[in-house]
Amino acid sequence: MVTAFPVHGEPLGPYGRPEGPGAATRLDLVLPDAVRDTLHAGLSRLPDPSEDIDRATARCHQVFAALPTELLQAVMDFGRHIDTAGVALVRNLPVDAVLPPTPDDGGPSRAKRGFVSEGVLLGLTGLLGEPLGVLTEKDGRLIHDIVPVAGGERTQTNQSSAVFLNFHSDITYDPTGRYDVANPDFLVLNCLRGDPLGVAVTYYADARDICGRLPDDELRLLRSPLFRLNAPGSYTRGAAGGAEVLSDPVPIISGAEEFPEITVSANGVRALSEAAAAAFERLQETCREVAHPVRLEPGQALLVNNRKGVHARSRFGARHDGRDRWLQRTYVRRSLWDIRYRVTPQNRRVHF
Ligand SMILES: [Fe+2]
């Protein structure tokens, strides 16, 4: 595997480890300063990308073409190959010269004048696939502002801060009963403002590492359709008054032994037997054992494969004073073709 510009020395979290069998599932990349500055120059002239997203992604593509070939290929390989890492931390990215206060309502900042962070997000996204929106997630916006929201502190959603956000995949409610089909292939998280207390840690656990640790009998249960996933909180709040909206029975782990796919809902998993429930508990413990920890800081972006692994976040403090942790996120599909049955008439990137 190409590991251009490797960087080591990430501080370890309680579940982390620097190397060993899991090393192949995490990729670390860092931009040389001169490349960061070139990207910044290109992105500092970017108009608000929400005005014409396809034009903006084309512009960002031109800017990111300035990446050194090894680095560019490493990101592209991350997106296109089944045997590459499931999480990639990209460091020394350009940042906005002036950053307004962190918004506190989960929506975009109305005070932000530059669009460097959006350009970084869309540039990296474009190397993996296409950004998409879902009406029930952040009102269908293509760039999601991930901030702690008052009232949502203890929910299993991206509004939370006061609870450990369990290991999960980002899934999408779908009337077919399968929530793991129309969901994003990747998430890209770009950090605009780190947690001022340095407490917030994002975790990624790869299904290959998880399967390597689980006993055969528990793996067999997790590979059986013995689990019903609850739809995301953003969906159940708006569509069902907070009541559960469960998927068809599905396996948690599926696909080829060497290249497993994993799906876990954040908002609750209903196991259909006691043995299945015990196997699911064991799965969450195993995720903690194999997880890669990342403490995101400004100028860093995390690329997450939403099929190869699951992610989690530690609890952290929120003060709602404009200085809270602030990430921007995209949902990414390699292709929008397979989810065209969900497209909204208003916008070809936005889905029901
Ligand atoms: Fe998530």
Image (cartoon, rainbow, N blue to C red):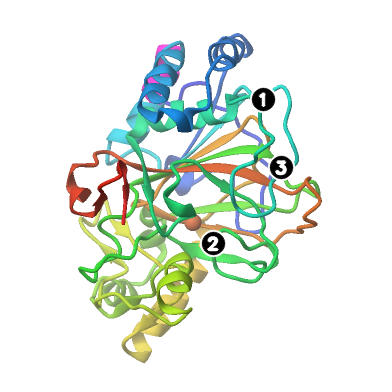
Residue 153 colored in magenta in the image: no
Placement of the C terminus among the 4 image quadrants? bottom left
Number of numbered labels in the structure image: 3
Q: Residue at x 67, y 57 (%)?
A: 148
Q: Is residue 71 magenta?
A: yes
Residue hosting label 1:
96
Disc 3 residue type? Answer: Gly
Depth check: give the residue in front, 151 or 258: 151
At label 1, the amino acid type is: Asp
Q: Residue at x 27, y 80 (%)?
A: 226
Looking at the rendered image, the disc whose residue lies closer to the viewer, 2 or 1, is: 1
Q: Main secondary structure of the magenta part?
A: helix
Is residue 1 at all visible to an observer of this figure?
no
Query: Up-down: is 345 above or below 50?
Result: below
How far across and how far down the image is residue 89, in percent?
53, 36
Quarter-wise, where is residue 326 in the image?
Answer: top right
Mark 3 lies on residue = 194
Q: Residue at x 77, y 59 (%)?
A: 317
Confirm whether residue 28 shows in the render: yes
Kind of residue at badge 2? Glu
Which segment is the magenta one?
A: 68-74
In percent of width and height, residue 43 lies at: 55, 17
- Mark positioned earlier in the residue sequence (2 or 1): 1
